[in-house]
């Protein structure tokens, strides 16, 4: 998950810049494929990480709440924040800033989760 988050952090702005500079169907397909691989690398391991963070008796509730609250807040406000970023900056690459912020938050959370699971 850390590798995927770091690669997303490093690659997202150049990918958006390339897409904005060369808005073709082929460019879009390549950008989507790269993002798809990075997101798969991250989200494939997420259920395992979440299940390790909660005791067995509270695992289903903990995993459900943690995942669904995060998806609701981040995903629900995503379009609003991205629209605001584009309007405020005037840049078509502004959605990459939102993803950069998400990758940084994710890396901080993964570091905290690693420390918590080491002491378990």
Image (cartoon, helix red, strand yellow):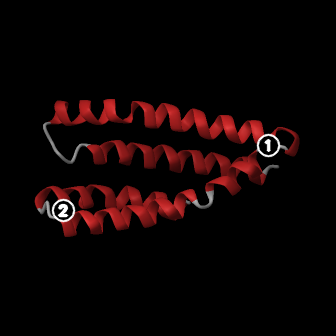
Instruction: State the residue at coordinates (38%, 35%).
Output: 78
Q: Earlier in the sequence, mark 2 or mark 1?
A: 2
* Side of 18 where 120 appears, left or right: right
Instruction: State the residue at coordinates (29%, 48%).
Output: 96
Label 2 SS:
helix
* Side of 92 where 65 appears, left or right: right
Residue position marked by numbered label 2 in the rendering: 18
Q: Could you say where residue 9 lies in the image, as x and y percent from the top left?
A: 38, 55
**Which class describes the residues within 10 Å of circle 2: few (<14), some (14-19), or many (20+)?**
some
Instruction: State the residue at coordinates (70%, 57%).
Output: 48
**Which class describes the residues within 10 Å of circle 1: few (<14), some (14-19), or many (20+)?**
some
| Quadrant including the N terminus | bottom right
Residue position marked by numbered label 1 in the rendering: 59
Instruction: State the residue at coordinates (14%, 64%).
Output: 24
* In the image, residue 43 above or below residue 93: below
Label 1 SS:
helix
User: Disc 2 versus disc 1: distance between alpha carbons?
Assistant: 42 Å
């Amino acid at each position: 998950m850390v590798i995927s988050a770091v690669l997303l952090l490093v690659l997202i702005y150049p990918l958006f810049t390339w897409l904005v500079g060369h808005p073709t169907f082929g460019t879009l397909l390549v950008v989507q494929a790269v993002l798809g691989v990075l997101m798969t690398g991250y989200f494939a391991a997420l259920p395992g990480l979440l299940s390790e963070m909660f005791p067995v008796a509270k695992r289903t509730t903990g995993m459900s709440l943690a995942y669904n609250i995060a998806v609701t807040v981040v995903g629900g406000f995503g379009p609003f924040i991205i629209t605001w970023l584009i309007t405020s900056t005037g840049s078509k690459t502004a959605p990459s800033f939102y993803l950069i912020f998400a990758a940084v938050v994710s890396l901080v959370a993964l570091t905290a989760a690693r420390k918590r699971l080491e002491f378990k």
